[in-house]
Image (cartoon, rainbow, N blue to C red):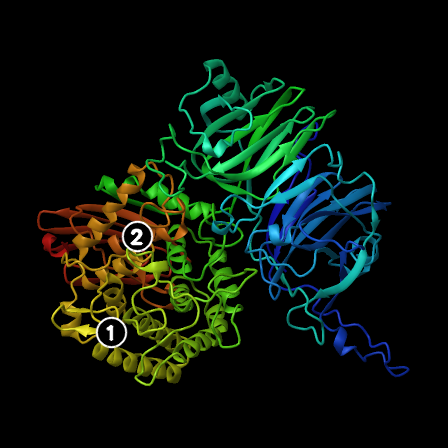
């Protein structure tokens, strides 16, 4: 029943680590599927009659605060129990919106991972309970409008169900004597420039009002029983409920970091607005720098005298996603604010950041939390939501009493996956940005694949193509990609279109992003081996295709008037919409649809539906014929973006090339490396450009484009940005596609059969004379190395057991098999 475990151990107890008190378990089946209560009105003597409308209901129920509450609010649910002998119990737990579960004061887990109402996740723990008295405490956040935009909610509450139904009366919510109260001392306010952020509100923690012990204090009331937990497939005639699914992901990484370089310490004038005061590099005495540096690295506390207002700017020297923990001494009226920024701004317009390593004379605009000290006791406070960035601004104000800051720590969080790939070539220009791409991918992987950790923290269907391919080439763990495909598949509206970002509290439709989902599903089918999962998505694939084809006009071309037809942040495209795409006829949108139909046909054919594949190819051919007639410009040798033939882009040429639907002579005329002034692809869409260049065999241009990414480390960036300068976000996962192109394009390792059951290696080294790398494969690792010699290429390929394929270079192909393969390809100049 279990698919994985992770232990939670008390490491701080005297005498060393104790045995685990809790183990997190990943399930491969839903619990309680056999719980089907007897019907209350069954005929006398009938012991088999079941209540069909109780089928699929858990033996435990959601519990809520008994009084009306308005989010944002933090709740505590408490159960006090006593055991006469030790027990090990399996518990399933979830909350709306999120929980931290503690046993006798020790945290044993937090969750659930983010989902939708129709796909709500629960976590499973095996917990050891010793004989004696215990307290189970669940701290539940219900932030409502103050939550990140990706956090949905039905009603604040908590659900805990023992796997053994007979334990429900002792431990389960809705059966045992759970109590509830509102936790005091929290206030929420939107961040600056709120419209640009989707990450939730800033929080002010008032230690004077907060309970010293969340499990104690006053105000406890009996919790109100709500609806029973609801199975997603078995329930009948139930009101709208959270449909409960086992967690798909392991616990997020939680690592304490003591880090940071103090760059500036300066007093602030009374009434000054820090965001309007330029930072002075190196301000502050050497003694102050040493003291604050020691604090950040776990050393001595810092004492801030009474009547002070102080700003400390800290450079974390890399990009981090973390929560903040502060330990404050007593200090009536004292506050410490910890704000995050990706970089400092050159002026108040908040557009230009300039070189990211520079802070002198720049302005700090950040998001983060404020911690208010208690007047007569120490306070240990941790932030609720994680934040992201490279720079931290610490603002300390004291009134009549000094403030001792005993600790300022960062708890780094993210998905627990480590890169399992490597790439080497003699081009140093690759080496400087590979760490940025890996860091971007890491900082964008949490309980979902998100776009930008600083501004949005949302999962977008359009970003999934690039992010997933980068993930396939760097790690074997594909659970985040599966979750993306699954949740978007369930996000469709009545017309078959899926949401562009999901989960989310609002609706947004981007037709090109629905087409990207088809691309992502196709890539999953070939890079990973799970045909059943792919088949389950095929009805959604068909619904998407039909929804998009419903936009065709009488001439057979798509005219899309619904939603935001975003394609790329290309120069001159308002809101990222290409010419003709906002309610007119767009070559880019139409070629994208034709390309997606060819991928859909391939999926149908490889998964047992040849008739549907034939239809998809026929419709794609009809669409391509209409496109050629409307948009091909014979004089230019390119497809125009719209019917006016005044605008031409790399985007249209890329998608037409990738569709494979062009006549050979026309395809040969499209020169993506010829220096013709086309509207250029920016970071995200360069993935499709590189794919098209690979199809054309333009290896030198591929290497040149990849080498141009050295501009980003030269700017001082630690991650890859969202778009060209001046970019909004300094960290965006879609740029990590360059990791894929190092492995799948330059080194040339790609699947050539569903499930990666065969491999085709077709390197495109261009001017490089030596390349080597490896990627994870469902059966092991694939490694390849090549070196140019005077009369050809020497290559060594290692394939895992059970895998075979071909390697092609210089116009020749050779079979390769499991184990080590040594090959030689003559004509060393043929791959230029």
**Secondary structure state at the residue bearing disc 2:** helix
In the image, 688: left or right of 315?
left
Quick one: 134 or 321, which is closer to the camera? 321
Q: In this view, does 386 lie above or below 699?
A: above
User: What whole-number distance in Å separates the C-alpha atoms at marks 1 and 2?
Assistant: 38 Å
Sort mark 2 into few (<14), some (14-19) or many (20+) by Cα contacts within 10 Å: many
Rendered location of residue 278, percent (x, y): 42, 29
Give the quadrant of residue 799: bottom left
Q: Earlier in the sequence, mark 1 or mark 2?
A: 1
In the image, 372: left or right of 636?
right
Q: Quadrant location of the N terminus?
A: bottom right
Give the quadrant of residue 34: bottom right
Rendered location of residue 76, percent (x, y): 74, 46
Sort mark 1 into few (<14), some (14-19) or many (20+) by Cα contacts within 10 Å: some
Q: Quadrant location of the C terminus?
A: bottom left
Residue 197 in view here: yes
Q: In this view, does 608 lie above or below 752?
A: below
Quick one: 9 or 243, which is closer to the camera? 243
Residue under the image location 65 percent in, 46 percent down: 109
Q: In this view, does 10 lie above or below 737?
A: above
| Mark drawn on residue 743 | 2
**Secondary structure state at the residue bearing disc 1:** loop
Q: Are marks 1 and 2 in contact (CB under 8 Å)?
A: no
Rendered location of residue 320, percent (x, y): 47, 39
| Mark drawn on residue 643 | 1
Rendered location of residue 643, percent (x, y): 24, 74
């Amino acid at each position: 029943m279990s698919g994985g475990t992770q232990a939670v151990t008390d490491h701080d107890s005297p005498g060393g680590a104790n045995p685990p008190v809790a183990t997190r378990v990943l399930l491969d089946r839903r619990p309680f599927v056999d719980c089907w209560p007897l019907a209350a009105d069954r005929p006398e003597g009938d012991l088999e009659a079941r209540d069909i409308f109780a089928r699929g209901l858990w033996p435990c129920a959601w519990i809520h605060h008994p009084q009306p509450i308005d989010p944002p609010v933090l709740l505590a649910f408490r159960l006090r129990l006593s055991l006469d002998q030790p027990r090990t119990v399996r518990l399933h737990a979830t909350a709306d919106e999120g929980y931290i579960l503690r046993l006798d004061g020790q945290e044993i887990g937090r969750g659930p991972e983010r989902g939708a109402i129709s796909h709500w996740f629960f976590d499973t723990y095996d917990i050891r309970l010793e004989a004696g008295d215990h307290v189970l405490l669940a701290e539940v956040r219900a932030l409502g409008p103050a939550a990140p935009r990706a956090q949905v909610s039905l009603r604040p509450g908590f659900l805990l169900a023992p796997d053994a139904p007979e334990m429900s009366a002792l431990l389960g919510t809705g059966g045992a004597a759970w109590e509830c109260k509102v936790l005091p001392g929290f206030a929420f306010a939107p961040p600056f420039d709120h419209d640009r952020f989707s990450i939730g509100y800033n929080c002010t923690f008032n230690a004077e009002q907060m309970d010293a012990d969340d499990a104690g204090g006053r105000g406890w009331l009996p919790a109100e029983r709500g609806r029973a937990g609801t199975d997603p497939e078995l329930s009948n005639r139930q009101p709208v409920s959270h449909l409960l699914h086992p967690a798909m992901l392991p616990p997020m990484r939680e690592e304490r970091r003591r880090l940071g370089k103090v760059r500036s310490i300066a007093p602030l004038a009374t009434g000054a607005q820090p965001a309007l005061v330029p930072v002075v590099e190196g301000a502050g005495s050497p003694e102050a720098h040493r003291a604050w540096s020691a604090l950040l690295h776990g050393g001595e506390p810092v004492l801030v005298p009474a009547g002070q207002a102080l700003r400390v700017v800290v450079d974390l020297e890399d990009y981090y996603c973390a929560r903040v923990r502060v330990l404050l001494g007593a200090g009536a009226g004292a506050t410490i604010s910890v704000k995050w920024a990706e970089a400092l701004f050159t002026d108040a317009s908040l557009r230009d950041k300039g070189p990211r390593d520079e802070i002198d004379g720049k302005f700090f605009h950040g998001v983060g939390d404020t911690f208010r000290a208690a007047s007569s006791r120490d306070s240990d406070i941790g932030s609720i939501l994680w934040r992201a960035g490279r720079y931290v601004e610490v603002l300390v104000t004291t009134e009549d009493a000094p403030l001792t800051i005993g600790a300022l720590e960062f708890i780094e969080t993210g998905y627990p996956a480590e890169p399992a790939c490597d790439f080497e070539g003699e081009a140093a220009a690759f080496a400087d940005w590979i760490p940025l791409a890996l860091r971007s991918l890491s900082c964008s992987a949490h309980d979902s694949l998100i776009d930008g950790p600083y501004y949005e923290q949302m999962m977008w269907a359009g970003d999934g193509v690039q992010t997933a391919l980068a993930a396939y080439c760097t790690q074997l763990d594909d659970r985040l990609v599966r979750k993306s495909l699954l949740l978007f598949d369930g996000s469709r509206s009545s017309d078959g279109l899926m949401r562009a970002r999901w989960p989310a509290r609002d609706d947004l439709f981007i037709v090109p992003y629905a087409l990207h989902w088809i691309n992502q599903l196709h890539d999953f089918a070939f890079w990973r081996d799970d045909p059943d999962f792919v088949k389950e998505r095929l009805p959604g694939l068909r619904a998407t295709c039909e929804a998009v084809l419903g936009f065709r006009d009488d001439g057979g071309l798509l005219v899309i008037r619904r939603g935001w037809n975003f394609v790329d942040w290309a120069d001159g495209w308002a809101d990222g919409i290409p010419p003709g795409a906002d309610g007119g006829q767009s070559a880019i949108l139409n070629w994208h649809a034709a390309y997606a139909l060819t991928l859909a046909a391939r999926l149908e054919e490889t998964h047992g539906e040849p008739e549907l594949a034939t239809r998809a190819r026929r419709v794609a051919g009809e669409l391509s014929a209409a496109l050629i007639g409307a948009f091909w410009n014979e004089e230019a040798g390119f497809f125009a973006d719209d019917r006016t033939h005044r605008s031409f882009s790399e985007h249209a040429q890329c998608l037409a090339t990738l569709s494979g639907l062009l006549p050979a002579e026309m395809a040969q005329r499209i020169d993506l490396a010829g220096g013709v002034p086309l509207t250029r692809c920016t970071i995200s869409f360069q993935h499709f450009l590189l794919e098209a260049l690979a199809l054309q065999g333009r290896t030198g241009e591929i290497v040149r484009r990849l080498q141009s990414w050295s501009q980003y480390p030269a700017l001082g960036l630690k991650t890859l940005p969202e778009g060209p300068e001046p970019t909004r976000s300094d960290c965006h996962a879609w740029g990590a596609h360059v990791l894929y192109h190092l492995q799948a394009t330059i080194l040339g390792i790609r699947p050539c059969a569903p499930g990666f059951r065969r491999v085709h290696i077709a390197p495109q080294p261009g001017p490089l004379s030596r390349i080597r790398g490896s990627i994870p494969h469902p059966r092991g690792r694939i490694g390849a190395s090549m070196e140019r010699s005077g009369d050809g290429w020497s290559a060594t390929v290692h394939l895992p057991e059970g895998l075979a394929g071909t390697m092609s270079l210089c116009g020749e192909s050779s079979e390769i098999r499991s184990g080590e393969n040594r090959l030689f390809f003559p004509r060393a100049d043929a791959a230029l």
